[in-house]
Image (cartoon, grey):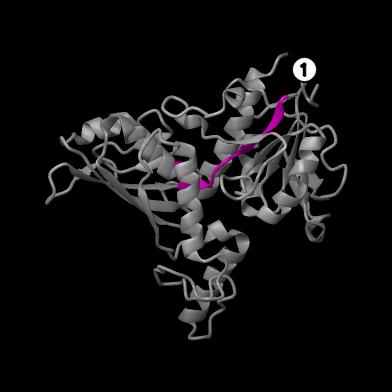
Amino acid sequence: MPPGHGSLPRIAIVGASSLRGKELKQVLENRSFPASDVVLLDESVMAGTLTEAGGEPTFIRALEEGSFEGARFAFFAGTPEDAERTWRMAQKAGATVIDLTGALSAGRQDAGPGFTVVAIPSLAPVASPTDTRAANGSSNSSSGRVAYSSPAAPVIIACTLAAGLAKLQPQRMVLTLFPPVSERDQAGVLELESQTAGLLSFREVSQQVFDAQVAFNLLARYGEGGRPHLTDVRGAIAREVAGYLAGRASVPAIQLVQAPVFYGYAFVAYAEFAPAVTPEQIEAALAGLGVRIAEAEDAAPTNVSVAGESEIHLARVERDPSIAGGVWLWGVADNLRLAATNAVRIAEELVAKSPE
Protein backbone atom coordinates (compact mmCIF):
# COMPACT_ATOMS: atom_id res chain seq x y z
CA MET A 1 0.00 0.00 0.00
CA PRO A 2 1.48 3.42 -0.96
CA PRO A 3 2.56 5.70 1.87
CA GLY A 4 -0.07 8.01 3.23
CA HIS A 5 -3.13 5.85 2.50
CA GLY A 6 -5.50 5.75 5.44
CA SER A 7 -3.82 8.79 7.01
CA LEU A 8 -2.86 12.32 6.10
CA PRO A 9 -0.44 12.12 3.18
CA ARG A 10 3.16 13.30 3.32
CA ILE A 11 4.18 15.62 0.47
CA ALA A 12 7.54 16.32 -1.13
CA ILE A 13 8.18 19.41 -3.27
CA VAL A 14 11.25 19.21 -5.50
CA GLY A 15 12.48 22.65 -6.57
CA ALA A 16 11.06 24.30 -3.47
CA SER A 17 13.20 27.44 -3.92
CA SER A 18 11.91 28.09 -7.46
CA LEU A 19 9.05 30.48 -8.16
CA ARG A 20 6.83 27.49 -9.04
CA GLY A 21 7.87 25.68 -5.87
CA LYS A 22 7.09 28.65 -3.65
CA GLU A 23 3.73 29.16 -5.34
CA LEU A 24 2.89 25.48 -5.02
CA LYS A 25 3.60 25.55 -1.29
CA GLN A 26 1.38 28.63 -0.93
CA VAL A 27 -1.48 27.02 -2.85
CA LEU A 28 -1.29 23.87 -0.72
CA GLU A 29 -1.62 26.05 2.38
CA ASN A 30 -4.37 28.28 0.94
CA ARG A 31 -6.46 25.28 -0.09
CA SER A 32 -5.86 23.56 3.27
CA PHE A 33 -4.58 20.44 1.56
CA PRO A 34 -4.70 17.60 4.11
CA ALA A 35 -1.01 16.81 4.60
CA SER A 36 0.83 15.44 7.61
CA ASP A 37 4.13 16.95 6.47
CA VAL A 38 5.53 18.97 3.56
CA VAL A 39 9.16 18.19 2.75
CA LEU A 40 10.94 20.93 0.80
CA LEU A 41 13.70 19.64 -1.48
CA ASP A 42 16.15 21.29 -3.85
CA GLU A 43 19.61 20.98 -5.33
CA SER A 44 22.43 20.93 -2.81
CA VAL A 45 23.38 24.58 -3.35
CA MET A 46 19.97 25.61 -1.92
CA ALA A 47 19.96 23.06 0.92
CA GLY A 48 19.84 24.64 4.35
CA THR A 49 17.89 27.70 3.20
CA LEU A 50 15.51 28.82 5.94
CA THR A 51 11.89 29.14 4.88
CA GLU A 52 8.47 28.29 6.32
CA ALA A 53 5.71 25.79 5.70
CA GLY A 54 2.29 25.90 7.30
CA GLY A 55 3.35 28.95 9.31
CA GLU A 56 6.27 27.08 10.88
CA PRO A 57 9.99 27.66 10.17
CA THR A 58 11.68 24.90 8.20
CA PHE A 59 14.73 24.26 6.04
CA ILE A 60 15.05 23.24 2.42
CA ARG A 61 16.69 19.82 2.29
CA ALA A 62 19.15 18.47 -0.27
CA LEU A 63 17.65 16.24 -2.94
CA GLU A 64 19.20 12.81 -2.45
CA GLU A 65 18.51 9.10 -2.10
CA GLY A 66 15.87 8.61 0.60
CA SER A 67 14.36 12.09 0.14
CA PHE A 68 10.99 10.58 -0.80
CA GLU A 69 10.73 8.12 2.07
CA GLY A 70 7.08 7.91 3.14
CA ALA A 71 5.87 10.51 0.63
CA ARG A 72 2.42 10.00 -0.91
CA PHE A 73 2.88 12.78 -3.47
CA ALA A 74 6.05 14.16 -5.06
CA PHE A 75 5.60 17.47 -6.85
CA PHE A 76 8.38 18.46 -9.26
CA ALA A 77 8.47 22.25 -9.61
CA GLY A 78 12.14 23.04 -10.28
CA THR A 79 14.08 22.33 -13.46
CA PRO A 80 13.21 19.65 -16.03
CA GLU A 81 16.71 18.26 -15.52
CA ASP A 82 16.10 17.66 -11.80
CA ALA A 83 12.76 16.03 -12.59
CA GLU A 84 14.24 13.77 -15.27
CA ARG A 85 17.01 12.73 -12.90
CA THR A 86 14.91 11.93 -9.82
CA TRP A 87 11.24 11.29 -10.67
CA ARG A 88 11.77 7.54 -10.95
CA MET A 89 13.40 7.64 -7.51
CA ALA A 90 10.21 9.18 -6.12
CA GLN A 91 8.02 6.66 -7.90
CA LYS A 92 10.14 3.75 -6.66
CA ALA A 93 9.64 5.03 -3.11
CA GLY A 94 5.87 4.74 -3.66
CA ALA A 95 5.06 8.40 -4.28
CA THR A 96 2.65 9.55 -6.96
CA VAL A 97 4.59 11.92 -9.23
CA ILE A 98 3.01 15.22 -10.29
CA ASP A 99 5.35 17.07 -12.63
CA LEU A 100 5.09 20.82 -13.31
CA THR A 101 8.37 21.15 -15.21
CA GLY A 102 7.40 19.62 -18.56
CA ALA A 103 9.91 16.80 -18.12
CA LEU A 104 7.16 14.18 -18.47
CA SER A 105 5.11 15.98 -21.10
CA ALA A 106 4.22 14.37 -24.41
CA GLY A 107 7.15 14.13 -26.77
CA ARG A 108 9.77 15.02 -24.16
CA GLN A 109 10.43 11.70 -22.44
CA ASP A 110 9.23 8.13 -22.25
CA ALA A 111 7.69 7.73 -18.81
CA GLY A 112 8.11 3.94 -18.68
CA PRO A 113 7.70 1.79 -16.82
CA GLY A 114 4.07 2.74 -16.42
CA PHE A 115 2.51 5.69 -18.22
CA THR A 116 2.07 9.44 -18.00
CA VAL A 117 -1.23 11.32 -18.04
CA VAL A 118 -1.47 15.04 -18.78
CA ALA A 119 -4.18 16.25 -16.39
CA ILE A 120 -6.25 19.44 -16.31
CA PRO A 121 -9.02 18.81 -13.74
CA SER A 122 -11.00 21.94 -14.66
CA LEU A 123 -11.59 20.47 -18.15
CA ALA A 124 -13.06 17.18 -16.89
CA PRO A 125 -16.59 18.16 -18.09
CA VAL A 126 -15.39 18.45 -21.71
CA ALA A 127 -12.05 16.59 -21.95
CA SER A 128 -11.41 13.68 -19.58
CA PRO A 129 -8.07 11.84 -19.28
CA THR A 130 -7.43 9.53 -22.22
CA ASP A 131 -6.34 6.64 -19.98
CA THR A 132 -9.19 5.02 -18.05
CA ARG A 133 -6.83 3.78 -15.33
CA ALA A 134 -5.90 7.39 -14.57
CA ALA A 135 -9.54 8.46 -14.67
CA ASN A 136 -10.33 5.78 -12.11
CA GLY A 137 -7.53 6.92 -9.82
CA SER A 138 -5.29 3.84 -10.29
CA SER A 139 -2.14 5.75 -9.52
CA ASN A 140 0.10 2.86 -8.48
CA SER A 141 -1.50 -0.32 -9.76
CA SER A 142 0.45 -3.46 -10.52
CA SER A 143 -0.17 -2.92 -14.24
CA GLY A 144 1.86 0.27 -14.21
CA ARG A 145 2.31 3.41 -12.18
CA VAL A 146 0.77 6.65 -13.35
CA ALA A 147 2.91 9.77 -13.42
CA TYR A 148 0.93 12.98 -13.85
CA SER A 149 2.09 15.88 -15.98
CA SER A 150 0.52 19.15 -14.80
CA PRO A 151 0.84 21.61 -17.70
CA ALA A 152 2.16 25.15 -17.58
CA ALA A 153 -0.18 28.13 -17.89
CA PRO A 154 -0.06 28.53 -21.71
CA VAL A 155 -1.04 24.88 -22.25
CA ILE A 156 -3.94 25.17 -19.79
CA ILE A 157 -5.10 28.38 -21.50
CA ALA A 158 -4.91 26.93 -25.02
CA CYS A 159 -6.59 23.64 -24.07
CA THR A 160 -9.34 25.44 -22.17
CA LEU A 161 -10.23 27.67 -25.11
CA ALA A 162 -10.05 24.85 -27.67
CA ALA A 163 -11.94 22.25 -25.61
CA GLY A 164 -14.52 24.73 -24.34
CA LEU A 165 -15.38 26.03 -27.82
CA ALA A 166 -15.23 22.63 -29.56
CA LYS A 167 -19.00 22.07 -29.45
CA LEU A 168 -19.50 25.38 -31.28
CA GLN A 169 -17.26 24.03 -34.08
CA PRO A 170 -14.97 26.97 -34.87
CA GLN A 171 -13.63 26.95 -38.42
CA ARG A 172 -10.31 28.28 -37.16
CA MET A 173 -8.73 29.54 -33.98
CA VAL A 174 -5.55 31.57 -33.57
CA LEU A 175 -3.97 32.19 -30.17
CA THR A 176 -1.22 34.73 -29.47
CA LEU A 177 0.38 34.32 -26.04
CA PHE A 178 2.42 36.95 -24.19
CA PRO A 179 4.66 35.11 -21.71
CA PRO A 180 6.01 36.97 -18.67
CA VAL A 181 9.68 36.70 -17.71
CA SER A 182 8.76 34.70 -14.59
CA GLU A 183 8.28 31.72 -16.90
CA ARG A 184 12.10 31.65 -16.80
CA ASP A 185 12.03 31.57 -13.00
CA GLN A 186 13.88 34.03 -10.78
CA ALA A 187 16.67 34.54 -13.33
CA GLY A 188 14.19 36.01 -15.82
CA VAL A 189 12.66 38.30 -13.20
CA LEU A 190 16.07 39.58 -12.10
CA GLU A 191 17.16 40.20 -15.70
CA LEU A 192 14.09 42.29 -16.53
CA GLU A 193 14.53 44.20 -13.28
CA SER A 194 18.21 44.80 -14.03
CA GLN A 195 17.55 45.81 -17.64
CA THR A 196 14.82 48.26 -16.63
CA ALA A 197 17.03 49.95 -14.03
CA GLY A 198 20.01 49.96 -16.40
CA LEU A 199 18.15 51.54 -19.30
CA LEU A 200 16.67 54.24 -17.06
CA SER A 201 20.20 55.00 -15.84
CA PHE A 202 21.73 54.84 -19.35
CA ARG A 203 23.87 51.83 -18.42
CA GLU A 204 24.67 48.70 -20.40
CA VAL A 205 22.11 45.99 -19.66
CA SER A 206 22.57 42.33 -18.80
CA GLN A 207 21.29 39.84 -21.40
CA GLN A 208 22.39 36.52 -19.92
CA VAL A 209 18.94 34.90 -19.90
CA PHE A 210 17.29 36.16 -23.08
CA ASP A 211 20.35 37.44 -24.98
CA ALA A 212 18.15 40.38 -25.97
CA GLN A 213 16.62 43.51 -24.50
CA VAL A 214 13.32 42.52 -22.93
CA ALA A 215 12.72 45.73 -20.97
CA PHE A 216 10.49 48.25 -22.78
CA ASN A 217 10.31 45.83 -25.70
CA LEU A 218 8.36 43.02 -27.37
CA LEU A 219 10.26 40.07 -28.80
CA ALA A 220 9.27 37.58 -31.50
CA ARG A 221 12.52 35.72 -30.81
CA TYR A 222 15.40 35.78 -28.34
CA GLY A 223 19.04 36.37 -29.14
CA GLU A 224 21.10 33.43 -30.37
CA GLY A 225 22.40 32.79 -26.84
CA GLY A 226 18.94 32.77 -25.23
CA ARG A 227 18.04 29.21 -24.27
CA PRO A 228 15.58 27.74 -24.88
CA HIS A 229 14.73 29.69 -28.05
CA LEU A 230 11.26 31.20 -28.13
CA THR A 231 10.46 29.07 -31.19
CA ASP A 232 11.36 25.97 -29.17
CA VAL A 233 9.07 27.07 -26.33
CA ARG A 234 6.28 27.65 -28.85
CA GLY A 235 6.84 24.20 -30.37
CA ALA A 236 6.75 22.51 -26.96
CA ILE A 237 3.48 24.28 -26.07
CA ALA A 238 1.92 23.29 -29.41
CA ARG A 239 2.92 19.64 -28.92
CA GLU A 240 1.50 19.52 -25.40
CA VAL A 241 -1.76 21.11 -26.53
CA ALA A 242 -2.10 18.69 -29.45
CA GLY A 243 -1.26 15.75 -27.19
CA TYR A 244 -3.86 16.71 -24.60
CA LEU A 245 -6.65 17.48 -27.06
CA ALA A 246 -5.87 14.26 -29.00
CA GLY A 247 -8.55 14.77 -31.64
CA ARG A 248 -11.23 15.84 -29.15
CA ALA A 249 -10.96 19.46 -30.33
CA SER A 250 -9.22 21.36 -33.10
CA VAL A 251 -5.74 22.53 -32.17
CA PRO A 252 -5.39 26.33 -32.40
CA ALA A 253 -2.56 28.00 -34.27
CA ILE A 254 -0.22 29.35 -31.59
CA GLN A 255 2.22 32.25 -31.58
CA LEU A 256 4.34 33.63 -28.74
CA VAL A 257 5.49 37.22 -28.21
CA GLN A 258 7.75 37.82 -25.20
CA ALA A 259 6.35 40.69 -23.14
CA PRO A 260 8.29 42.98 -20.78
CA VAL A 261 6.21 41.99 -17.74
CA PHE A 262 7.16 40.11 -14.60
CA TYR A 263 4.03 38.03 -13.94
CA GLY A 264 0.74 37.16 -15.61
CA TYR A 265 0.23 35.31 -18.90
CA ALA A 266 -1.79 37.53 -21.26
CA PHE A 267 -3.29 36.25 -24.51
CA VAL A 268 -5.50 37.27 -27.40
CA ALA A 269 -7.47 34.70 -29.36
CA TYR A 270 -9.34 34.95 -32.64
CA ALA A 271 -12.00 32.39 -33.55
CA GLU A 272 -14.22 32.17 -36.60
CA PHE A 273 -17.55 30.36 -36.77
CA ALA A 274 -19.92 29.47 -39.60
CA PRO A 275 -22.71 29.90 -38.94
CA ALA A 276 -21.93 32.81 -36.65
CA VAL A 277 -22.42 32.39 -32.91
CA THR A 278 -23.17 35.05 -30.35
CA PRO A 279 -20.71 36.28 -27.71
CA GLU A 280 -23.15 34.93 -25.13
CA GLN A 281 -22.90 31.43 -26.59
CA ILE A 282 -19.12 31.58 -26.43
CA GLU A 283 -19.12 32.84 -22.85
CA ALA A 284 -21.58 30.11 -21.83
CA ALA A 285 -19.37 27.44 -23.46
CA LEU A 286 -16.36 28.54 -21.39
CA ALA A 287 -18.19 29.06 -18.11
CA GLY A 288 -17.48 26.40 -15.51
CA LEU A 289 -14.13 25.43 -17.04
CA GLY A 290 -11.93 27.46 -14.73
CA VAL A 291 -12.72 30.67 -16.61
CA ARG A 292 -14.04 33.87 -15.07
CA ILE A 293 -15.70 36.22 -17.56
CA ALA A 294 -15.91 39.93 -16.79
CA GLU A 295 -19.27 41.50 -16.12
CA ALA A 296 -20.48 44.16 -18.54
CA GLU A 297 -19.44 46.97 -16.19
CA ASP A 298 -16.01 45.47 -15.35
CA ALA A 299 -12.71 46.59 -16.80
CA ALA A 300 -10.81 44.08 -18.94
CA PRO A 301 -8.43 41.89 -16.92
CA THR A 302 -4.76 42.86 -16.70
CA ASN A 303 -1.55 41.26 -15.48
CA VAL A 304 -1.95 43.24 -12.27
CA SER A 305 -5.65 42.53 -11.68
CA VAL A 306 -5.27 38.73 -11.90
CA ALA A 307 -2.36 38.47 -9.45
CA GLY A 308 -3.08 35.71 -6.93
CA GLU A 309 -6.11 34.41 -8.87
CA SER A 310 -6.45 30.72 -9.73
CA GLU A 311 -8.68 31.11 -12.79
CA ILE A 312 -8.29 32.33 -16.36
CA HIS A 313 -9.86 35.79 -16.60
CA LEU A 314 -11.57 36.85 -19.84
CA ALA A 315 -12.88 40.20 -21.00
CA ARG A 316 -16.28 40.21 -22.69
CA VAL A 317 -16.17 38.56 -26.11
CA GLU A 318 -16.08 41.03 -29.01
CA ARG A 319 -17.27 40.53 -32.58
CA ASP A 320 -14.82 41.28 -35.36
CA PRO A 321 -16.00 44.45 -37.18
CA SER A 322 -15.02 43.14 -40.63
CA ILE A 323 -15.52 39.37 -40.67
CA ALA A 324 -18.92 37.78 -40.10
CA GLY A 325 -18.59 34.98 -37.57
CA GLY A 326 -15.26 36.28 -36.30
CA VAL A 327 -14.77 37.00 -32.59
CA TRP A 328 -11.90 38.16 -30.37
CA LEU A 329 -11.13 37.08 -26.82
CA TRP A 330 -8.73 38.89 -24.50
CA GLY A 331 -7.62 37.25 -21.29
CA VAL A 332 -4.95 37.00 -18.60
CA ALA A 333 -4.01 34.41 -15.98
CA ASP A 334 -1.58 34.45 -13.08
CA ASN A 335 0.89 32.04 -14.65
CA LEU A 336 2.34 30.69 -11.41
CA ARG A 337 -0.94 30.43 -9.51
CA LEU A 338 -2.81 28.80 -12.42
CA ALA A 339 -0.16 26.10 -12.86
CA ALA A 340 0.22 25.43 -9.14
CA THR A 341 -3.52 25.22 -8.56
CA ASN A 342 -3.87 22.72 -11.40
CA ALA A 343 -1.20 20.49 -9.83
CA VAL A 344 -2.79 20.63 -6.39
CA ARG A 345 -6.21 19.82 -7.85
CA ILE A 346 -4.74 16.65 -9.37
CA ALA A 347 -3.60 15.58 -5.91
CA GLU A 348 -6.94 16.56 -4.35
CA GLU A 349 -8.83 14.36 -6.81
CA LEU A 350 -6.51 11.42 -6.17
CA VAL A 351 -6.95 11.80 -2.39
CA ALA A 352 -10.73 11.91 -2.85
CA LYS A 353 -10.64 8.67 -4.88
CA SER A 354 -8.28 6.86 -2.50
CA PRO A 355 -9.78 4.14 -0.27
CA GLU A 356 -9.94 5.02 3.39
Q: Residue at x 41, y 44 (%)?
A: 158
Q: Residue at x 69, y 34 (%)?
A: 114
Which residue, given by chain and number where applicable, does mark 1 sit on? 6
Task: Identify whether 17 is placed above or below 339.
Answer: below
| Side of 76 relative to 159 (left or right) | right
Relative depth, front residue between 109 and 337: 109
Near mark 1 (Cα within 10 A), the count class, few <14, some 14-19 or many ≥20, is few
Relative depth, front residue between 211 and 298: 211
| Side of 265 relative to 316 (left or right) | right
Where is residue 37? Give x, y as percent.
78, 33
Where is residue 178? Give x, y as percent.
41, 57
Relative depth, front residue between 154 and 344: 154
Mark 1, secondary structure of its residue: loop
Task: Classify the position of the N terminus by image quarter.
Answer: top right
Extreme residue in the right direction: 66
| Side of 356 relative to 335 (left or right) | right
Q: Amino acid at mark 1?
A: Gly
Q: Residue at x 84, y 43 (%)?
A: 67
Residue 15 in sight here: no
The magenta-colored residue range is 143-156
Does the segment drawn in magenta span residue 114? no
Where is residue 70? Give x, y as percent.
83, 32
Q: Residue at x 66, y 29 (%)?
A: 33
Task: Classify the position of the C terminus by image quarter.
Answer: top right
